[in-house]
Structures are given as C-alpha cells and as structure tokens.
Image (cartoon, rainbow, N blue to C red):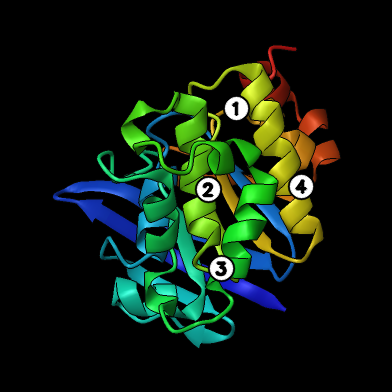
C-alpha cells in the first residue's frame, strides 16, 4: 500500500515558488530518501507533510487526505523529527522522551516503549537524568530520534539526521534506522549526505530547485552520470 502519496505539491514563501509540482510516494514498510543540495526544498516538503506549511496539491496518508492540523497528523502516526531537533534543553533526557508520548498519556505501553528506546540508544539510559542541553550533538540527535519513536510513528520523517555528526555516530544511527525499518517502520528520510542515503534506502528521489528530477533505486542512482558527477564526486 502507498502509505504516503503526494501529488502536484506547490509551496510558496511569499512570492518564492519553493516546491514546484512535486509528486512522490512512500510504500508501507519502505525506507525512502529524498536527497538534494541545501535549499532544494527538502525541509519545506517535510513541513508540508506535517501540517506546518500551507500548500497547493494533495497529500494522502493511508489513502485518506491529511488533515491540516499538525496535532491531528501526529495522532495518525506521522511523526516528524526535524533538522533543528527542537529538544527541551533544560529538561532531562527522560522528560524529553516522555513528552514524545504526550498524546499517549493513558497508554500502558509507554513504559515499554521507553525501554525499547533505551535499548536502541543505551547512552540515553545511562544519562537519563542529565539535561538535554549538556549532551553532545550526536547524543542530542539520538534523543531527538528516540523522542520521535515514543510517539509510535507509522511514518517517521527524518530531516537531515546526520548533519554535523561524526562518522562513528552516523554509523550508530544508521544501525538503529536499519533495525526499526526491518521491524516494519516506514521511514522517509531527507538527507544531503547522498552516500548515507544511497546505502540505506529502498528508493530515492532527487530534489533540485524545488522539483523532483529523478526517482530510482540505489543502483539506478549510482549509474546516473549527473548523480555521480554532482553528488558522488566520481
């Protein structure tokens, strides 16, 4: 099933036409990436899906039109982990994680999900009483992803999760993403690190100046002369 389907999406910032007729889909259980340079419109795309940006066109989730209310979109299981992370810096790791499940406050499974996040990111368990602001950049990214998982996403939107991270931290996050995808979670990734995206995704879209210019598999992208020259340095 096409869990997410976008057709002819147009988004403007004032008079600037940021997304131009974008159409794409993400199947249930897939790991799909949208790649492209900074300023191509990846974050705007994710903000549109999450109900944070007005748009023209259609966005359907589980074969139904997405509501315009961000909270209602979260209730459907679309959870957005933004590039800026938006952690609560003066709250503990534990409290940040629990807030990720705030719309599930009567759900008895919350504690079990917390243990699952701790198993994925053991450092968060070790430092659960520590303030979020005291964490390294990589640890903050782990916390942001963990908080998103506490919402029990049916579709996890990850915006630039590797930006500015050391290679060893990227590797740790990669293992977690692979694991949760293999367990059935659908992941839609926005990423400038093309090699990271290529190695992990079932399918990819290339977004340039607000338009989808290519769709395909890892093999198809690696065979594309424009991709090799512009993004892989080959």
On the image, the x and y values in percent for residue 175 come to 75, 39
Q: Which residue is mark 4?
A: 178
The numbered mark, 1 or 4, whose residue comes first in the sequence reads 4
Foreground: disc 2 or disc 4:
2
Give me the residue at 46% from left, 45% from top.
Answer: 144
Q: What is the CA distance from the residue labelled 2 to the residue labelled 1?
A: 18 Å
Residue at mark 1 to residue at mark 4: CA–CA distance: 16 Å
Q: Residues within 10 Å of mark 4 (few under 14, many from 20)?
A: some
Image spot of residue 216 (x, y percent): 75, 48
Q: Quadrant of the C terminus?
A: top right
The residue where tag 3 is placed is 111
Q: Left or right? Give the position of 208 relative to 170.
A: left
Pointer 3 or 2: first along the chain: 3
Q: Nearer the viewer, mark 3 or mark 2?
A: 3
| Pointer 2 residue | 145
Q: Which mark is residue 16?
A: none
Q: Which residue is mark 1?
A: 193
- Front residue (pair 146, 15): 146
Percent x, y for residue 186?
Answer: 67, 63
Mark 3 or 4 closer to N-term?
3
Position above or below: 51 against 118: below
Q: Find numbered disc 1 in the image and state the secondary structure of the residue it sits on.
A: loop
Return the disc, 2 or 4, that comes first in the chain's sequence.
Answer: 2
Do labels 2 and 1 touch, CB within 8 Å?
A: no
Which residue is most to the bottom?
64
User: What's the CA distance linking mark 2 and mark 4?
Assistant: 13 Å
Q: Looking at the image, tell me whether mark 3 or mark 1 is earlier in sequence order.
A: 3
Q: Quadrant of the N terminus?
A: bottom right
Query: Mark 3 and mark 2: span between their CA atoms?
Result: 17 Å
Please provide percent x and percent y for residue 89. 28, 39
Q: Earlier in the sequence, mark 2 or mark 1?
A: 2
- Secondary structure under tag 3 reads helix
């Amino acid at each position: 099933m096409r869990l997410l389907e976008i057709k002819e999406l147009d988004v403007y910032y004032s008079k600037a036409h940021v997304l131009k007729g974008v159409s794409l889909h993400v199947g249930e259980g897939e790991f799909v990436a949208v790649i492209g340079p900074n300023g191509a419109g990846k974050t705007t795309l994710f903000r549109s899906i999450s109900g944070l940006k007005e748009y023209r066109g259609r966005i359907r989730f589980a074969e139904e039109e997405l509501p315009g209310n961000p909270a209602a979109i979260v209730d459907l299981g679309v959870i957005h982990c933004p590039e800026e992370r938006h952690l609560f810096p003066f709250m503990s790791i534990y409290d940040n994680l629990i807030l990720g499940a705030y719309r599930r406050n009567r759900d008895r499974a919350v504690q079990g999900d917390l243990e699952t996040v701790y198993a994925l990111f053991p450092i968060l368990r070790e430092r659960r009483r520590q303030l979020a602001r005291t964490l390294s950049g990589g640890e903050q990214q782990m916390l942001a992803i963990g908080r998103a998982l506490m919402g029990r996403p049916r579709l996890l939107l990850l915006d630039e999760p590797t930006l500015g991270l050391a290679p060893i931290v990227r590797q740790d996050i990669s293992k977690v993403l692979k694991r949760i995808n293999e367990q059935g979670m659908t992941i839609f990734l926005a990423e400038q690190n093309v090699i990271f995206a290529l190695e992990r995704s079932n399918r990819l879209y290339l977004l340039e100046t607000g338009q989808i210019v290519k769709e395909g598999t890892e093999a198809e992208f690696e065979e594309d002369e424009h991709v090799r020259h512009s993004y892989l340095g080959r």
